[in-house]
Amino acid sequence: MNKLKTMLSAIALLLMFSTAAMAQDAIAAGAKTVTEQLKTQLALNDSQTAKVLEINRTYLKKLNETKLAGGAKVDQAKKLKVLDTDREAKIKSVISADQYKIYVANRGLNTKKLAEITKE
């Protein structure tokens, strides 16, 4: 019986780590996809691309954590708004004024792309 419990515990632990690893892979892939889209739209240089990639990774990780935490939809919406505002400010600090105008003009398309990524 102890061997069975040990084996079941090991399987549960393996599944937990596998799920966490898959989530991290999905976040990294999503951040890369969104960043590549912004790189093309805004003609980001290498330094900007690296910074925007990190901003997107952090944003998607926190977004995932917020969604997994659950709770009331109103509370989640407030948290998501804070995350969006924070991401926006960070991106604005990395790009030029001209790039920001393009960013704002494409906000709808970019939001749609993010929504597609976070559904996967």
Image (cartoon, rainbow, N blue to C red):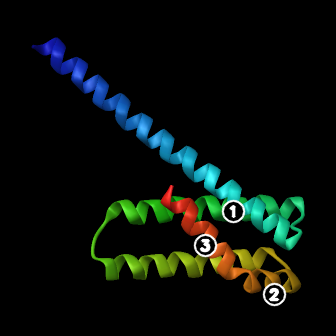
Q: Position of residue 102 (x, y in %)?
A: 81, 82
Mark 3 Cα-neighbour bin, 10 Å: few <14, some 14–19, many ≥20: few
Residues at marks 2 and 3 touching, judged by CB atoms closer than 8 Å? no
- For residue 15, say whether it is visible: yes
Q: CA distance from mark 3 to mark 1?
A: 10 Å
- At label 2, the amino acid type is Lys
Identify the mark nearer the N-term, 3 or 1: 1
What is the secondary structure assignment of the residue under circle 3? Answer: helix
Q: Residue furthest left?
A: 1
Identify the mark nearer the N-term, 1 or 2: 1
Q: Which residue is mark 1?
A: 34
Query: At x 59% / y 78%, what residue is drawn?
Result: 86
Query: At x 78% / y 74%, what residue is drawn?
Result: 94
Q: Is residue 81 above or below residue 62?
A: below
- At label 1, the amino acid type is Val
Residues 74 and 48: in front is: 74
What is the secondary structure assignment of the residue under circle 1? Answer: helix
Residues 45 and 119: in front is: 119
- For residue 51, say whether it is visible: no
Q: Which residue is mark 3?
A: 112
Query: At x 57% / y 44%, what residue is drawn?
Result: 25
Q: Which residue is mark 2?
A: 101
